[in-house]
């Protein structure tokens, strides 16, 4: 499992570090057309608020014009929080919780109680479906966007939890050479180089390279490991009409994986949960490793046909390879903590996504009515082969864990391969009616086939979407929308009797109404009511993962982001939701809340830059998740929790170089809490962590 990119990238980085002549203005290299997609220069955000949304058909659209809940976590927010994981970024948006796993290996995430599917809902640069089965690094990302709810018009078969889009850093007109180091009190350390240059007589070539490597330690027992990243974002303005972009990233993480804790069996319809264990304890041993690597490739060409029309063609591939010794603590005595640790072995597991897209987009201008049209075709093939072996059981104790002697698989690894093919064509028309009204109409036709070891499904669907927006003022928009989505209903996980079985696809419906306002040029406010209906799943009496009728998710979501004053920036959100299962034929779950679904979540993070001490900024954040049921029968709930973070960063010049030093204290109160539930598992939140960082800009 080796992929040798570091040599190439290191050479490029060394080239960047050589003295460079001052570049001419990039403006000379920009094409004459007004179509923004041909411009490869990166948006250099210095705000907690973004001015554009780049996910799906909302290509570089102002947030006020997007008739759907969208949140953007900018680079400035990520830097202020020293965030390097997806959950670290997404906890700034409403309705986000961890699911099944506690995040020591990667972030399994739900939004509004709906799982964000790991093979289809995470996108690179609005397009490539990357595979979220390994921590996706953020050090080479400019921003993280979340488009909440159904998104099938552009992305095909995806759950209505939302699309998480990661936009890579690119070379702008100014050269960049940043060197950073970070460490925590447990001995975790990493170093990071971020270098960008433009080349050529017209500055038509751009390259940005990121290199990262370091030791992982998160403050729990029997834990060790490392992670590394090599990435490059390249672009070429071939001429005034044609531009090319190429992204490549390879990252690896090998760490000890914490054991999942099984939810106890119900007694007379009630589950009694254990007390939350000490966050520093690890029921697994250091040798029970999670070793994964990912490679993502994306090539895109934009061609400006004229001032009003352009053509987009892109192709990409994402791959994850994984070895895993996953353990699950089960069948334990609540009083004594004595139980069984079961370990599952996985070797040579492989996931692949291949994606292509062709699209023509442009406008039909008119005096009163203007049409902005996108017509595209997509093809996506997702294959996987988890490859598992035998399990072994050993005695363990929840409250006083002991070290587990290393064991090896005792049976051959068996293949459980499957493949999904998702082909589609879509048409989207944004109709501008004067200066105050906008309508968005769309339709997608999809051809879907899923082939697994024990199941095969085919589906042909046509799904509409429509929205209407009214702007009484230039800085205020009011909208309503209806979207139909199609989704894969899921695949039975390893701890279920029908492990690997693919459930039948299903249609989801979403209604949403909201208002957005931009106060001055500083703060973006959003409020929305949403109503989502989708197929629900449960675990039956035979321990099988099965469909269970419909579920409805209704709620209100609020958010604010941006600069209150030149000194004060904030990003905050809240969600209040009522989610119910609607299958009257199943009395055990009818009217109950889907598992791991909170009724409330909230977050608020603010940074204040002191005028009395130029360069010094102080920050604090609170992230709250309400109580959640541990199963679809609501036989027990994990308690709500709030996590406090504190931070400070100071920017100054040392030897003429801009230098920033930073300290961030996460879980400042050292709170012990259940951070995750779902799929019959519980996970404990991370202990207190002090991160120290320094960055020098050469």
Image (cartoon, rainbow, N blue to C red):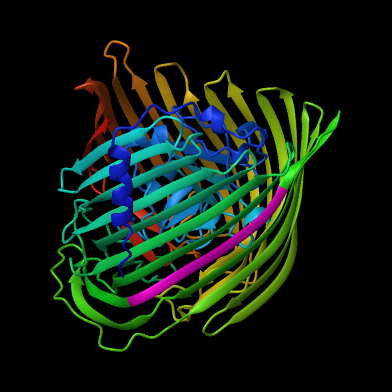
Query: Does residue 16 appear left or right of residue 556 in this picture?
Result: left
Report the predominant secondary structure element of the magenta stretch: strand
Q: Using the image as rendered, state which of residue 191 and residue 305 is in the foreground.
A: 305
**In the image, which residues are magenta?**
347-360
Query: Per the image, is 350 magenta?
Result: yes
Residue shown at 36% from the left, 48% from the top: 85
Above or below — where is 644 with respect to 450? above
- Residue 364, how many percent across, how many down? 81, 39
Q: In the drawing, does residue 259 fall left or right of residue 414?
A: left
Q: Position of residue 490 (x, y in %)?
A: 54, 69
Residue farthest front in this picture: 201
Q: Is residue 290 visible?
A: yes
Q: Quadrant of residue 92?
A: top left
Q: Nearer the viewer, residue 168 or 402?
A: 168
Tell me: residue 368, above or below residue 340.
Answer: above
Q: Quadrant of residue 18?
A: top left
- Image position of 389 (left or right of 569): left
- Residue located 36% across and 56% down the image: 135
Residue at far bottom of view: 411
Position of residue 103 measured from the top left corner of the image (x, y, whole percent): 34, 55
* Residue 416 drawn above or below residue 677: below
């Amino acid at each position: 499992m080796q992929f040798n990119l570091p040599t190439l990238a290191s050479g490029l980085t060394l080239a960047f570090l050589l003295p460079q002549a001052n570049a001419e203005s990039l403006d000379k290299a920009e094409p004459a057309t007004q179509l923004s997609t041909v411009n490869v220069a990166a948006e250099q955000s210095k705000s907690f608020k973004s001015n554009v949304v780049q996910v799906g058909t909302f290509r570089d659209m102002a947030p006020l014009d997007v008739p759907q809940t969208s949140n953007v976590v900018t680079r400035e927010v990520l830097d202020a929080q020293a965030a390097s994981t997806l959950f670290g970024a997404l906890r700034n948006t409403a309705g986000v919780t961890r699911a099944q796993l506690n995040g020591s290996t990667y972030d399994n995430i739900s939004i509004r109680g709906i799982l964000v599917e790991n093979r289809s809902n995470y996108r690179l640069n609005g397009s490539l479906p990357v595979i979220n089965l390994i921590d996706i690094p953020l050090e080479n990302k400019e921003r993280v966007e979340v488009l909440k709810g159904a998104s099938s018009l552009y992305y095909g078969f995806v759950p209505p939890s939302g699309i998480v889009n990661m936009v890579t850093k690119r070379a702008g007109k100014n050269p960049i050479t940043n060197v950073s180091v970070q460490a925590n009190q447990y001995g975790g350390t990493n170093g990071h180089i971020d270098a960008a240059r433009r080349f050529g007589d017209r500055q038509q070539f751009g390259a940005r390279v990121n290199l990262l490597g370091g030791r992982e330690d998160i403050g729990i027992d029997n834990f060790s490991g490392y992670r590394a990243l090599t990435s490059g974002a390249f672009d070429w303005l071939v001429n005034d009409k044609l531009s090319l972009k190429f992204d490549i990233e390879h990252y690896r993480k090998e760490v000890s994986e914490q054991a999942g804790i099984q939810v106890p069996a119900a007694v007379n319809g009630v589950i009694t949960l254990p007390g939350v264990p000490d966050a520093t304890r690890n029921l697994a041993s250091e040798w029970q490793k999670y070793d994964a690597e990912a490679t993502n490739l994306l090539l895109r060409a934009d061609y400006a046909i004229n001032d009003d029309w352009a053509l987009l063609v892109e192709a990409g591939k994402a791959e994850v390879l994984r070895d895993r010794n996953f353990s699950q603590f089960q069948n334990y005595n609540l009083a004594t903590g004595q139980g069984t640790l079961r370990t599952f072995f996985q070797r040579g597991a492989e996931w692949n996504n291949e994606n292509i897209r062709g699209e023509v987009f442009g406008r039909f201008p008119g005096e009163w009515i203007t049409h902005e049209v996108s017509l595209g075709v997509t093809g996506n093939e997702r294959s996987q082969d988890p490859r598992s072996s035998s399990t072994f059981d050993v005695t363990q104790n929840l409250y006083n864990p002991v070290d587990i002697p290393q064991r090896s698989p005792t049976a051959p690894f068996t293949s459980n391969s499957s493949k999904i093919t998702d082909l589609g064509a879509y048409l989207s028309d944004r109709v501008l009616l004067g200066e105050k009204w906008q309508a968005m109409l769309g339709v997608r036709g999809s051809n879907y086939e899923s082939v697994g070891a024990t199941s095969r499904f085919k589906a042909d669907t046509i799904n509409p979407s429509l929205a209407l927006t009214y702007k009484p003022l230039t800085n205020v928009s009011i909208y309503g929308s209806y979207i139909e989505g199609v989704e894969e209903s899921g695949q039975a996980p390893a701890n279920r009797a029908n492990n690997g079985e693919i459930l039948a696809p299903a249609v989801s419906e979403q209604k949403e109404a909201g208002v957005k306002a931009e106060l001055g040029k500083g703060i973006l406010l959003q409020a929305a009511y949403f109503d989502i209906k989708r197929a629900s799943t449960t675990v039956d009496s035979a321990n099988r993962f099965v469909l269970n009728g419909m579920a409805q998710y209704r709620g209100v979501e609020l958010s604010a982001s941006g600069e209150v004053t030149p000194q004060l920036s904030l990003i905050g959100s809240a969600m209040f939701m009522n989610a119910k299962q609607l299958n009257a034929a199943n009395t055990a779950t009818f009217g109950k809340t889907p598992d791991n679904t909170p009724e409330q979540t909230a977050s608020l993070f603010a940074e204040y830059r002191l005028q009395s001490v130029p360069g010094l900024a102080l920050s604090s954040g609170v992230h709250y998740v309400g109580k959640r049921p541990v199963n679809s029968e609501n036989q027990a709930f994990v308690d709500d929790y709030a996590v406090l973070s504190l931070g400070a960063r100071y920017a100054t010049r040392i030897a003429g170089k801009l230098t920033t030093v930073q300290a961030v204290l996460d879980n400042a109160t050292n709170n012990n809490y259940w951070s995750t539930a779902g799929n019959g598992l519980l996970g404990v939140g991370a202990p207190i962590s002090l991160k120290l960082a320094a960055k020098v800009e050469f």
